[in-house]
Image (cartoon, coloured by chain):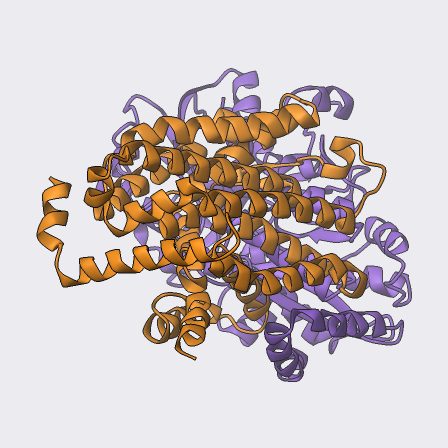
Chain colours: A orange, B purple
Amino acid sequence: MAESNKHAGDGPTASAKNAAIGRSFTRRRKTVPGVPALALKTVPVVVSILALLVAGPSVLTSYWVGLLTQMMIFAILAMSLDLLLGYTGLPSLGHAGFFGVAAYTVAVLSTAHHAGFWTCVASGILLGTMLSAALGLLVSHVRDVYFLMITLALGMVLWGLSYRWIPVTGGDNGISGIPRLEAHAGLPVTGPVAFYYVTLLVFVVCGVFMALIVSSPFGFTLRGIRENESRMKSLGFNTWLHCYISYVMAGAFASVAGVVWAYYNGFVSPTYLDLTASSELFLMVTLGGPGTLVGPALGAGAIVVLKNVISAYTQRWLLILGTVYIVTMLGAPQGLWNLRRRHRAGS
Amino acid sequence: MTIADRAIADRRCCVVFVLLAAAGTLAGSQGARAKADGPIKIGFIAPLSGPNAQNGRDILNGFLLHLEEIGYHAGGRPIEILVEDDEAIPAVGLTKTRKLVERDKVHLMTGALLSSTGYALAPYIDSMRIPMVFPVVSADDLTQRRRSKWIVRTGYSGSQPNHAFGEYAYHTLKLRKVATIALDYAFGWESVGGFRRTFEVEGGRVTQRIWCPVFVHDFAPYLAQISRDVDAVYALFLGRSALQFMRQYQEFGLKQRIPLIGAGTTTDEHVLPFMGDEALGVITPLHYSAALATPANTKFVAAYRAHYKRVPSYYSESMYTGAKWVVAAIDAVRGNVEDSAALVDALRSVKLQDLPRGPLRLDDYGNPIENVYIRKVERVHGELQNTVIETFPEVTQFWKYNPGDYLKQPLYSRR
């Protein structure tokens, strides 16, 4: 049914889009094999961001080190949603659920069951990924607004579970007293800076993996599905399977972020996986620029700063956040990072 | 006033921060510049928005009232108070506390409303070694099984007044079967748990326990569950939920059939002025009532009314006393708040007389020993008040039990 709708919508815009895909394919061939031209332009930016991140703790106060740690965790999460939203074109409004499930897994295992570090980490990532594999079966055959509604509902179910499954999750109390990562993992160094570098490592590894995924043939297929699914189907691609795998991978990376968050925050509660959290994540991606990975990472950083710093100065910081969104949507509907790309293309 | 100045001065920095994250070093040099002669910084969190905003407002007002009395000066140094809104959400409370401690470098933390917020903050406070005073937060384990050197409580533990109330309900009110309906989080579990323990030891029976989500909107499904053969209903709510519960309890025709008792917050003065006849006759225990007829309390109530045009609630009194407590400790260390360990020792050894609530001293676990008042809602001179009908003097958090044995038993939970 969705297909026939797509066909009906095929018109001059669709063919223009197809031409655009064609361009990106040919452009890719002209440059270094395996590395898209766009990524090459992004490299200096990414390298300088990473250099700043590595040097950060030597000049920053512990508060800003903590804030940067948060930014990187949410950057992983936003990039994982970008796999779905930006590259596959599947708008998920329940993505914070996987993040939360992984965080809760770490919290429950480390406090109530006194499990070891690697057990907690592995179970957190595994459970989040398995859950996305199970839920993926339910959602991968729907598109657009239906996908949005179903993921929203599933996200609410996960939130409800954390809120009302009180013997395990503590309900509204949440779970506090999660051990510090350094102590739990038996690292020789402690403190916010040590944790910062662990997070940076995870961030870089996840970032590289996701960049490899989106620049692989698999990633290009996802983009093809985003632009015109029926065409990809007629070319012989199993689009359902591609969407499913993309959903599971997004869930897996979100779980990684959840595990790191649990250790960073030392506390989990239903607040971290409610609808507000999911939609905030959605906004990080749309604000930064969907389909770019770098954009959502920067969007995540910007929103973490806005939330933490602006709220210290005014009770009406949500008003400022709202204005930022509106201005972005009006002035740069493709997100801030894509704005930069458009300017370059123009010049 | 000082807050406004700071906000203006820092607003420029704020812009710089957003543009240039690396400029965070500025904040560092600012923080490090706070020398021993600068102001004493007190970090303060309270829910100033959302359904518990009235509780938060009373919490802040009570604290500010005493600071104004002493002209924002203690131990020879000016006092600066940095206020953050925790929206009564534990996760937000933790974020704001982190900001106050790490960015603003406060010397001492206080405030907070919900027990769940208390539990969320405790490990962080402990790891940062920041003295924290909880004048309101009543989470039992903060001064019991999970106590920390850095946490001092001047309020009460959730089960403390309810231990006394359980006995009172059995012997004086002659109740035998009680149903409870309470908010589903730490404060609810611990209060109901304390009541149930002593009530059942005496021979009574809690036949039914109903739990409502913290942000409950409609009590109809919960009220329908109450069995009609109980002698009384014990209710625990606060803020908006207390108002709504009282109204719906009457609308369901239950008020005429089953007497209502409950935790102190259900009829506390933060909601009592907004209630009508539906609240009349409700009996609750707490360590304070605005209707206490002692000279110290009469003076406090008059000062509070003159300042804020409202009757003080137990939150106001708690924070007023909390402020006195903090100031006494600051005086004791002669303003040297940079020495956190000495400050927390001073906080534990403060002795104060003539408090609005009556006598108050800390036990070895950092929890108050104080009177518990059984109060009944009456209308006096056209205004509802919690008339004190019985006093249990010097009640500890362990009631009549041996602390060692008490702590071996698990914390009260919803099971």
How many numbered callouts? 0
Say whether residue A19 is left or right of residue B8: left
Residue at screen point 88% across, 52% down:
B341
Say whether residue A22 is left or right of residue B393: left
Give B385 or B122, whichever is nearer the viewer.
Answer: B122
Give B172 or B87, whichever is nearer the viewer.
Answer: B87
- In this view of the protein, can residue B295 be seen by the observer? no
**Residue B205, x across and y down, in percent:** 45, 18
**Residue A66, x across and y down, in percent:** 68, 55
Above or below, comparing residue A99 to residue B94 in the picture: above
Residue at screen point 57% across, 25% down:
A123
Above or below, comparing residue A110 to residue A293 in the picture: above
Q: Residue furthest front?
A: A30
Residue at screen point 41% across, 55% down:
A291
Q: Quadrant of the N terminus of chain B?
A: bottom right
**Residue B116, x across and y down, in percent:** 56, 42
Above or below, comparing residue B350 to residue B338 in the picture: above
Q: Examine the image and state in which quarter residue B63 appears.
A: bottom right
Say whether residue A277 is left or right of residue B363: left
Residue at screen point 62% across, 47% down:
A203
Give A220 or B74, whichever is nearer the viewer.
Answer: A220
- In this view of the protein, can residue A82 be seen by the observer? yes
Q: Examine the image and state in which quarter residue A285 appears.
A: bottom left
**Residue A346, x across and y down, in percent:** 39, 77
